[in-house]
Amino acid sequence: MRIKEEFSYFGKKLQRLCSRLRLKLVCYFRSTCFLIWRLYRHFRLRLNSLSVHLIYFISISFLGFWILKVLKPRTAGSFKPRNIDLFFTSVSAATVSSMSTVEMEVFSNTQLLILILLMFIGGEVFTSMFELHIRRFYLRRIIRNTERKIDRSSTGIINPSSSPPNSLELIELGIVVTEVDCLAKTTPDHNNQIEVHRRQMTTVESTSKSDMEDSDSNLKYNSIKLLSFVVMGYLLVINFVGVALVSVYLALVSSARNILKKKGLKLFTFSLFTVVSTFASCGFVPTNENMMVFSKNSGLLLILIPQVLLGNTLFPPFLRFSIWFLGKFVKKVRPSSDYLLAKTGDIGYHHLLPGLHSSLLVGTVVGFIGVQFTLFCSMEWDSVALSGLSSYQKVVGVLFESVNSRHTGETIVNLSTIASAILVLFVVMM
């Protein structure tokens, strides 16, 4: 009996201890959740576009550095990049600045794929598309909250059967006040009924205004939704076409394909890396000599020139053209397309420019390229930088150099051999 009593005593003690511990854990968990929720609301209300961009780029830079560090480089036996070199390259790829402290041929094929991903998600077109999707999400939440408020307020509207005859017609004609004043003059004993009618008419008017605002909000939401998907389609289609064309060119032209074989680069990896880097205006090329080893491959240079322009200065005009094209041939999206083209300022997407600005931008781009092309040809046609090239290769090479001086920074010549006047011209254009 005594042993049973002792076991019973210790059992009760243990049960009390467990119950107290459970209560403390529950209180701690609730307090932690409440603290996290309060911190989340605090920072969410104070986050702006700069903070979101800063957090985004810091996060992907550190993530890219960690993955690059885990993966082994191609020259693991003889040379291994330092951590600071890997972090520098990761930040450079994520911010598309094209600066590197190590040669690109040091990285393995898997590491090159990681750099491709960093350049893709760090490019201006992708980040602006990501921002559009966030804005669309928050706008949808605002519209839903507004609809709920309208539904709640509509429950307080008096039964329409008690309203005076033809009140809705009078509202549409804008003579509601006249009707109420007439009632006040002819039936002074019915002040309560007049007040009821006045409140109902005010409620109906405010509801109709809310419906109009809600309709405008839905149109704006649908327009931003269309714009976000147009930008996504533009991004994917241009990159896909570029990769396909470069891959086909490398598969058909043996001279370009042999360069990749000598350097141990895979054809698809090179195509994807070069196109993504060019479109994102990064300028990274998976060769140590940049594009100088392809100076005689004019076809490859002609494929990359549109990628440079479509991912940078010509993105706004072609984005506007894409929206116009969809609205012209797809009736379902025509209202949203017309809204985007007519009210570019209300959308707040800085890449969507008015028609006049887009036309002027195209003229400016063509003019600057023409000036650089003319001066470069007149001063460097017989120089050492373009030696060994045919006339056609020189024309394409100078055009490629003129386009890239303001965008990606890819080059087919040794810039140290160019005349100082051309370098000054490049500085002005940059």
Image (cartoon, rainbow, N blue to C red):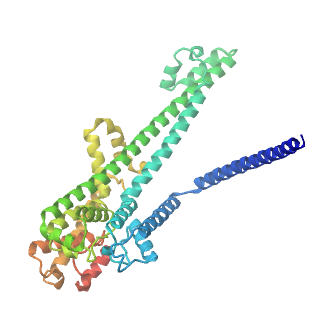
Q: Is residue 273 above or below residue 172?
A: below
Q: Residue at x 33, y 38 (%)?
A: 333
Q: Is residue 356 above or below residue 164?
A: below
For residue 402, side relative to residue 87 (left or right): left
For residue 391, side relative to residue 276 (left or right): left
**Residue 270, located in which quarter of the rendered image?**
bottom left
Residue 75 at x, y percent in the picture: 34, 76
Q: Is residue 245 above or below residue 422?
A: above
Does residue 130 appear in the picture of this structure?
yes
Residue 343 at x, y percent in the picture: 39, 47
Camera-side residue of 304 and 159: 304
Camera-side residue of 101 and 377: 101
Q: Residue at x 24, y 58 (%)?
A: 243
Residue 310 at x, y percent in the picture: 27, 59
**Residue 337, located in which quarter of the rendered image?**
top left
Residue 247 at x, y percent in the picture: 20, 60
Q: Residue at x 17, y 73 (%)?
A: 397
Total labels drawn? 0
Camera-side residue of 310 and 206: 310
Residue at the right extreme, as displayed: 2
In which quadrant will I find the N terminus? top right
**Residue 116, located in which quarter of the rendered image?**
bottom left
In which quadrant will I find the C terminus? bottom left
Does residue 349 appear in the picture of this structure?
no
Camera-side residue of 319 and 169: 319
